[in-house]
Image (cartoon, grey):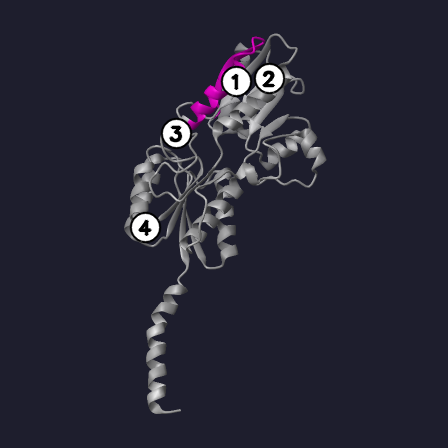
Amino acid sequence: MTKKFLAALLIAATALTPLAAMAQDPIRLAFLAASSQNGYNDATWQGVQAAAAEAGDVQVEIFDGEFNAATQYAQVEDIIAGGRFDGIIVAPNDTVGIATALEEATKAGLLVASVLFPVGPSLTTMTPQVPGLTVTVASDPTIGATAQANEVIKFCEGKDPCNVVIMIGQLQFPFDNLRYQTMVDTLKPHANIKVVATGEGSYSPDASLTAFQDIIQANPKIDAVLSNADQHLLGVEIALNDAGIPIEPIYLIGGGLNAITVDKIKEGIFDATLSGYPRSEGYYAAQTLIKAKKGETVPNFIDPADLAKNPLVVDKAWLDANPDFKAEWEG
């Protein structure tokens, strides 16, 4: 082997080294949780981590949005300025306000995924409303709210009046207001159904307990409780027990499908819940951004409900028939 040939090999190796190093750089994704203290968001984070571990060349980091829209907006700005990340997965606190920041992120070359809710003025438009946004991983909230209300309608057949309480998160949130209006509009054509009260549970058993205690003082005869969140039913259960009101005759339907509620349904305490897929949302969002970063063609909308094995509304009959089912989050 000549000296000239060895020199040529050395030059070639030197030229390739920077490219090889670039190819080995990990993909870095930031998960902007609505709140890192929230059980649903924690399960979403677990899904993000699972997708990263599966890919093997991905680093992920979580940011606590503290259920504060301004905090989350500032986090997007900091990520853009810092230049450390290739993509952002956001569980938005403000689905409209965060849009401007995310558009700036896409302009800066960042890949962006939204989970649980779409980002933009329409909560029922799942295809990206923000220019450049990669994917929305969420379900149309009106579909779930309608399904829940229809279960109440079935229960109320033959009952006149059938007194219903709606427990919602907070009506100031656009997504909760949309769910609430959908529930009311679905129930309205049925003259036997009376919505006697609405309580705001703020996704907290304690807040729900206080709200429901006030409700049953004014409305001791309740036939059904329709809620968008399983956490609310925990407070409702305590309030009913404290008041000495039997739970079994009251139809209780929540939302989220957490492990606590699964056990309550199996025990016959709660009746049903709307399915929630927090871990799947995080997994599909991270997986999609990873594939997009690698140059693969990806969908711009994924509905986790379409990929799930369980039905939209889970009740005792389905759980009894599927004893090995595991919820995606603890609650």
Provide the residue designation for mark 4: 109
- Rounded to the nearest angstrom, the CA distance separating label 3 from label 4 is 24 Å
Of the residues under marks 2 and 4, which one precedes in the sequence? 4
219, 163: nearer the viewer: 163
The amino acid type, in three-letter code, at marker 3 is Ser
On the image, the x and y values in percent for residue 254 come to: 56, 27
Which quarter of the rendered picture does the C terminus lie within? top right
> Which comes before the other along the chain, label 1 or label 4?
4
Residue 193 is inside the magenta segment: yes
Q: CA distance from mark 1 to mark 2?
A: 9 Å
Q: What is the secondary structure assignment of the residue under circle 4?
A: loop
Q: Badge 1, how many Cα within 10 Å: few under 14, some, many 20+?
A: some
Q: Which residue is located at x 54 percent, y 35 percent?
A: 276
Alpha-carbon span between mark 2 and mark 4: 48 Å
Separation of marks 3 and 2 at Cα, in angstroms? 27 Å
The residue that mark 1 highlights is 186
Sequence-wise, the earlier of marks 3 and 2 is: 3
Residue linked to disc 2? 153
Image-based side of 71 in relation to 278, left or right: left
**Magenta region:** 175-201
Question: Are discs 3 and 2 less than 8 Å apart at CB?
Answer: no
Residue depicted at 39% across the width and 62% down the height: 25
The disc placed on residue 122 is 3
Q: Amino acid at mark 4?
A: Gly
